[in-house]
Structures are given as C-alpha cells and as structure tokens.
Image (cartoon, rainbow, N blue to C red):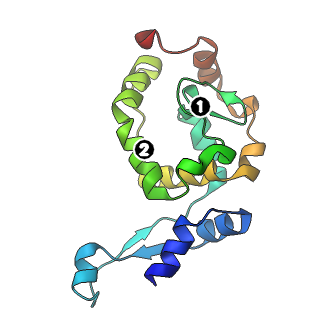
Amino acid sequence: MKQALRNCIFAPLGAVGLALIIATPITLQTTTEAQAGGNGSPTTTIPEMDAQRGKALFAERGCVICHSVNNVGSDVATSLDASNMNIAREPFEFFARMWRGAPQMLALQQADLGYQIDFSGQDIADIFAFVQSREIQEGFTEQDLPDHIKEIIDNGPSAAFE
C-alpha cells in the first residue's frame, strides 16, 4: 500500500494520473497508526481535488495578484504554470513551499487586498489540482479575473514592497 501510494503521489503526473488523483480520495495512516499496526485507528483522508474549482479560487481569492498561470497574473512570485511545476508534483511539498512563503504572502495580501485570504483545506486541495493541470490552465484567461483583482494587478506590485 505504501509503495502504491508513493508511486501515485510522487510519480510525475500525466493527464491520466491527475484525473485519477482528482477522482480518488487518498487515505493515509498517521505515524502513530503505522507504529501501532493500524488496527482500527482513525485515518486521514485527503479531500478530492477539483481543478476547475481551483481555477476559480486562484482568480477570485487573488493568488493571481502575485503568481501567474498561462501568462495571466503577476510576476511578483513564482509562476505556477503546470509545465514549470517540477518543484512540487506532490501535495505535501507544495504545501511546505507555501508555508515557507507564508509571511510574505500574508504581508502582500494585507497590503494589496486589505485582509488575509482565508482558505479551507478543500480550497488548497482544489488550487493544488489547478496548478497541476495543464489542460485547465490553458483555459485560464484575463476574463476569469474579477475586476478588483485586475485593478490590483494593473497597479503593479504592492507599494509596501517597492
């Protein structure tokens, strides 16, 4: 089971692999459960991921203010094009990279939006699916952006970081 899960998560994702991950919830044992033999212990279920919903969240919540996808958005932070995502093909590395950038992301959110973006675990899972999906990203255009997000991008990086 561990090897099958490792192959599923860590192998480079193709369209079929991404579709399987999006359609299949993954259940993981915690370290304590594995040490205890996994007998009846609770498990953690990673939510099903929806790349189309992730696309909408990426635009609506303002991720695109700092990150670009399909040449839409800003270059203040790393581009999140699926073709460039060799750094984070598995969710836990992706989340770890987000965590390491959290102080800067929070400061930019406060400066540009006036508030901190609130994400649920499902939101993050869906955004992860979007940044992994070349197919969904190809349909991402400026028309997907709300007007207030376009305005922030057009005004350039936050004045707090100039």
Residue at image x 48%, y 57%?
91
Q: Is residue 58 above or below residue 96?
A: above
Residue at image x 43%, y 76%?
27
Mark sitting earlier along the chain (2/1): 1
Q: Which residue is mark 1?
A: 64
Q: Which residue is mark 2?
A: 97
Residue at image x 57%, y 73%?
24
Query: What is the distance, in whole Å, between disc 2 and disc 1 at their CAs?
Result: 17 Å
> With 27 as the anchor, is 49 left or right in this view?
right
From the top left corner, tell me how far across and down residue 52 is, in percent. Answer: 67, 52
The amino acid beneath tag 1 is: Val
* SS category of the residue bearing label 2: helix
Residue at image x 68%, y 53%?
133
Front-most of residues 88 and 135: 88
Q: What is the total number of numbered labels drawn onto the structure image?
A: 2
Residue 146 picture quarter: top right
The amino acid beneath tag 2 is: Arg
Q: Nearer the viewer, mark 2 or mark 1?
A: 2
Disc assigned to residue 119 = none
Front-most of residues 66 and 48: 66
Q: Is residue 68 above or below residue 47?
A: above
Front-most of residues 146 and 8: 8
> With 82 as the anchor, is 103 left or right in this view?
left
From the top left corner, tell me how far across and down residue 82 is, in percent. Answer: 66, 47
> With 28 as the anchor, is 137 left or right in this view?
right
* SS category of the residue bearing label 1: helix
